Amino acid sequence: MRQDIVNDNSLTFAEKIISVRADGAEKIHRPGDITVLPVDLAMAQDSTGPLAIKVFGEMGVPRVWDQSKIHLVIDHSFPAPDEKVANLHHLMREFVKKYGVRLVEGSISHQHLLENHVVPGMVLFGADSH
């Protein structure tokens, strides 16, 4: 780990993580820079996950990049309150079967990831509104 970046108090916490984790990591990465990062974990929940799954299907991609790093979480509407939501959950379960990614049901997505998978310095992307 580059201590010069970690110890630079002019950088935000996010700038430090991004600069340390960026491919090459030869420079400080600032807002507006194009930066390539290794993704440690990706998450989609039952409100946004089905949208991503539909787009993924339209792209015709044969596989995901790393099954162990993708988590689908059913947390906003569990159990399904109606047929429409049940169909969305079914879509997520079928994606899990086809691509071998992880499915978590009945847990709060953000909390589940924090308590079970995330460690300091990880790069995590979530398909959520916040």
Image (tube, rainbow, N blue to C red):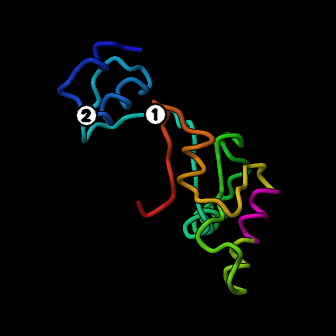
| Quadrant of the rendering where the N terminus is positioned | top left
**Residue sitting nearer the eye, 7 or 116:** 116
Residue found at the very far left of the displayed protein: 10
- Find disc 1 in the rendering and name its residue: 37
- Residue 86 picture quarter: bottom right
Up the image or down, 70 lies above or below 9; here it is below
Give the percent coordinates (x, y) of residue 130: 41, 60
Number of marks present in the image shown? 2
Magenta span contains residue 96 = yes
48 with respect to 17 (left or right)? right
Q: Is residue 99 above or below residue 5?
A: below
At horizontal 20% and vertical 24% (from top left) the residue drawn is 9
Q: What secondary structure prevails in the magenta region?
A: helix
Which badge, 2 or 1, comes first in the chain's sequence? 2
Residue at 73 percent across and 49 percent down: it is: 101
Residue at 47%, 31% (x, y): give it: 120
- Give the amino acid type for the residue marked by disc 1 in the picture: Leu
Along the viewing direction, whichever of 90 and 60 lies nearer the viewer: 90
Identified by mark 2, the residue type is Thr
Instruction: Name the secondary structure under disc 2.
Output: loop
Q: Evaluate if marks 2 and 1 touch, with contact meaning CB atoms under 8 Å apart.
A: no
Q: Nearer the viewer, mark 2 or mark 1?
A: 2
Residue range of the region highlighted in magenta in the rendering = 90-97
Residue beneath label 2, please? 12
Q: Residue at x 31, y 20 (%)?
A: 6
Residue 33: % across, % down:
28, 37
Q: Residues within 10 Å of mark 1 (few under 14, many from 20)?
A: some
Whole-angstrom CA distance, mark 2 to mark 1, is 17 Å
| For residue 119, above or below residue 86 | above
Quarter of the image for residue 91 reads bottom right
- Residue 115 x/y as whole percent: 58, 43
Q: Is residue 123 magenta?
A: no
